[in-house]
Image (tube, coloured by chain):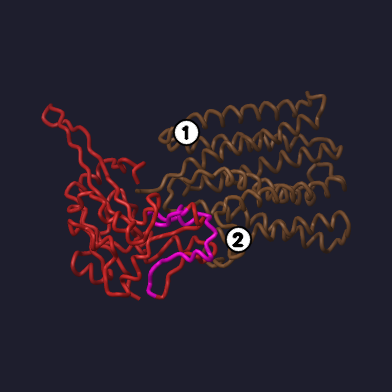
Chain colours: A red, B brown
Amino acid sequence: MPQYAFYIDTSACSGCKACQAACHDKNNTRSEIKWRRVYEIEGGGWEQQNGAFISVPFSYFISMSCNNCGSPVCVKACPTTAMHIDKNGITVVDPQLCIGCRYCEWACPYNAPQYDSIIKTMTKCDLCEDYLLAGKKPACADACPMRALDFGTFEELSRKYGEEKRLLPLPEPGLFDPGFIIKPHRDAGRATNEKVKVAAKKEI
Amino acid sequence: MEKDYFSLVLFTVLSQTAAGGLILREILLHSDLDYQISKEFRVLSLFITGIIIALALGAAFMHLGKQVNAVHSLRNLRSSWLSREILFIIIFSATVLLYWLNEKFWNIQVLNSILSFTGLLAGAGLLTSMSAIYMLPAVPSWNSMITPISFLITSAAGAVSLLVLLNAFCGCVTAKTLLAILAFAVILSLITSGFMFSYIKESGLLVFFIIRILMGLITLILIFLNYLNTFPNKMTALSVLFTTVLLTEMAGRVIFFLNYHKSGL
């Protein structure tokens, strides 16, 4: 079964959060449940060049949802098999089985499973499976005004965009085999040598 | 980290104490250590271990969002350490209950041996699976050998302080070797918190760390005074010691849970 994947162009993303809004709108999720989130990454500071201190800050945005990992740690961690890979190859959660222990939330490096404090079970992005079956792309990918998001099978996307998966501060992809391809922001190369952090965490 | 982690603090410390308590009990019963064992102790230690594991199960149950679905918890034994932990805690609890019934009423020797063996296996399995649950690649602050070591130390400290107390309750002489082991466990426990120091400093958990160190020092003083037999009421002194050991370990566990830092995002 082919692995579905997202293409995330962090050089084009303006952090407008249209993808996040489209996701809420399509899935009718409350504001605290963010199946897609936009992280602002910041780094830099001051550098001494030729005796002068120069300000070298940078920031970029990463739009992140469930990455439909090839080796999904959430599925392995779930004690009840509520988190499972369905017949279309998409990792989904069955609320009839979920005990709301939130272990999948701990295990997932991308914060994809989100706890719903009203229904007391986990919820997550299902890649807009109904749209996929109707031949459409997920709502987030279609909503992006910068065309910073694209969606398809990993094979299709890698033919178009290559296979880059590394971008700080995302974890080493080899551990999880995430279904995404990244176009790094122009400053991402600098981030490899500098401490980067997620800005405005409370907003996420 | 979700806000209701306190139920997990209770669950982990209590279940580790219970598992350690049963394992240590079996070691004491089957070893040549200079330790007085009475029939009353054999029954009471199982009864109290049962109460502690029941409290731990209650705390674990409270942590769940949808308790009604808990019946499905054993469906993923193939890959989920959480599922395996639940299996081990069920076997452990059932073993403790049967063991207590047998020691108190039936006195079937063969059954005693079987239950002793099952209890040791289930206790060891519970401690192993509990450590494996927290060693997540996505959470580097937990994914180290410090996690199983600190869990084992909690288990040892809780178990020794419990059995020393129960032994005194049954009128036996307090084994000073056990108090020395307890002091060693508490010192090791404080050292393992020190290994988390870089994360603690970063997260602003320094206040909790200082509370933990102070409580540890109070526990060490209490162990020393009990060692010297300076308290007129031994039972009260050992009860206070058991309580401070549990509180010290719980303080350490609060730091552990607040020290939840994911890699990357």
Whether B224 is among the magenta residues is no
Q: Is residue B100 left or right of residue B60?
A: right
* Amino acid type shown at disc 2: Val
| Residue B224 screen position, x and y as percent | 70, 27
| Residue A87 screen position, x and y as percent | 41, 75
Q: Chain of mark 1?
A: B
Majority SS type along the magenta span: loop
Q: Chain of mark 2?
A: B
Tell me if residue B121 comes above or below residue A42 in the rendering: below
Q: Is residue A73 left or right of residue A154?
A: right
Tell me if residue B159 comes above or below residue A171 in the rendering: above
Do residues under tags 2 and 1 come within 8 Å of each other at their CB atoms? no
| Residue B9 screen position, x and y as percent | 58, 43
* Amino acid type shown at disc 1: Leu
Give the residue at mark 1: B205
Q: Residue at x 61, y 42 (%)?
A: B153
| Residue B39 screen position, x and y as percent | 87, 48
Q: Residue at x 46, y 68 (%)?
A: A84
> Mark 2 against mark 1, which lies toward the viewer?
2
Q: Which one is in front, A162 or A2?
A: A2
Q: Secondary structure at mark 1?
A: loop
Range covered by the magenta-colored residues: A88-116
Q: Is residue A124 left or right of residue A14?
A: right
Q: Residue most toward the left?
A: A50
